[in-house]
């Protein structure tokens, strides 16, 4: 049976929101990866963790202006977190937009402080006090809380779509998981790409990141297939150019070819940067297809 959400009006989300979804996934994914390496990796892997913190901050900084510019009244963006009458903090736990705004802001604070701590650890910031943010029991707790916000941000965009009454989005509960896995994969790909240009990143930690990215891409492929099956008859909405773009741009270019390149020429040659770039392209196309294919549906289907 076709979805009964086909009659609803689209929220008019276009490229600004798609780019926000993309950078939000990278921001959350890179911080979460950095935190996992920090908490469970070997001491010699800390340069790779710091690289993740370096990636997370600029990625999350790009999110806020993209969201603000997409609003009908950008100058009123502060109404998302502040009461306009009493100028007190406003948190609506039942509103995905309110929860997401606060999560983005709080994650941004953790990303900023971890960025400063990474600079101090690298000797690039002459304020030794910031190093304490990543040291000892307090440092582990700080990083763990930041990672919780990071996981939330990476999956939140998919969850936001799922609770929006639109075809495809509201017809599956797997978008949050799919976007979380895609965020982890694109973040790992970007870290691998940048690690090749950065001195002091150990090969063992980098190999582990390769293996992690391989497993995440495989899981992403499985979840994507299950998601399409879960849509049932609604999946016919992708029997068009959008479905072809999903198959070629995401499954083939963004997952299968990078997996082949990883195993064909492991840690060497042009295969490594090419694979990373293709994963990033596939992650962006995934978000574009999910958002724009639903936006394009204007009327009921059969």
Image (cartoon, helix red, strand yellow):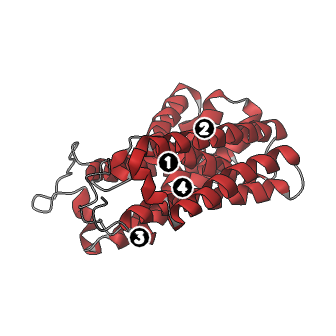
- Foreground disc of the pair 2, 1: 2
Q: Which mark is residue 219?
A: 2
Estimate how packed mark 2 is, as few (under 14), some (14 to 19) or many (20 or more) residues with alpha carbons within 10 Å: some
> Residue 132 location, x and y as percent?
56, 37
Q: Which mark is residue 57?
A: 4
- Foreground disc of the pair 4, 1: 1
What kind of element bears circle 2? helix
Q: Are marks 3 and 1 in contact (CB under 8 Å)?
A: no
The residue tagged 3 is: 14
Residue 210 located left or right of residue 147: right
> Residue 96 location, x and y as percent?
28, 48
What kind of element bears circle 1? helix
> Residue 12 location, x and y as percent?
32, 69
Q: Are marks 2 and 3 in contact (CB under 8 Å)?
A: no
Estimate how packed mark 3 is, as few (under 14), some (14 to 19) or many (20 or more) residues with alpha carbons within 10 Å: few
> Residue 57 location, x and y as percent?
54, 55
Residue 36 located left or right of residue 41: left
The residue tagged 1 is: 179
């Amino acid at each position: 049976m076709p979805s009964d959400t086909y009659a609803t009006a689209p929220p008019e989300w276009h490229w600004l929101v798609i780019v926000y979804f993309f950078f939000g996934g990278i921001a959350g994914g890179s911080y979460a990866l950095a935190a996992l390496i920090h908490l469970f990796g070997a001491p010699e892997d800390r340069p790779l963790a710091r690289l993740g913190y370096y990636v997370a901050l600029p990625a999350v900084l790009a999110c806020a202006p993209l969201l603000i510019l997409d609003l009908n009244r950008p100058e009123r963006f502060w109404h998302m977190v502040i009461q306009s009458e009493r100028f007190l903090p406003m948190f609506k736990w039942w509103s995905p937009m309110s929860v997401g705004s606060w999560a983005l802001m709080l994650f941004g604070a953790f990303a900023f402080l971890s960025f400063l701590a990474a600079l101090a650890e690298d000797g690039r910031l002459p304020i030794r006090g910031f190093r304490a943010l990543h040291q000892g029991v307090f440092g582990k707790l700080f990083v763990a809380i930041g990672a919780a916000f990071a996981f939330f941000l990476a999956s939140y965009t998919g969850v936001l779509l799922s609770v929006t009454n639109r075809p495809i989005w509201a017809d599956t509960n797997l978008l949050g998981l799919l976007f979380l896995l895609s965020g982890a994969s694109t973040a790992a790909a970007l870290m691998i790409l940048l690690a090749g240009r950065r001195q002091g990143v150990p090969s063992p930690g980098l190999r582990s990141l390769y293996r992690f990215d391989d497993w995440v891409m495989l899981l992403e492929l499985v979840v994507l297939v299950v998601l399409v099956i879960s849509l049932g008859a609604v999946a016919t909405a992708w029997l068009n150019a959008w479905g072809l773009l999903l198959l070629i741009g995401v499954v083939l270019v963004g997952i299968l070819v990078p997996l082949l390149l990883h195993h064909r020429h492991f840690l060497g040659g042009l295969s490594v940067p090419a694979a990373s770039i293709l994963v990033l392209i596939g992650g962006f196309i995934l978000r574009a297809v999910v958002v724009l294919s639903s936006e394009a549906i204007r009327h009921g289907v059969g």
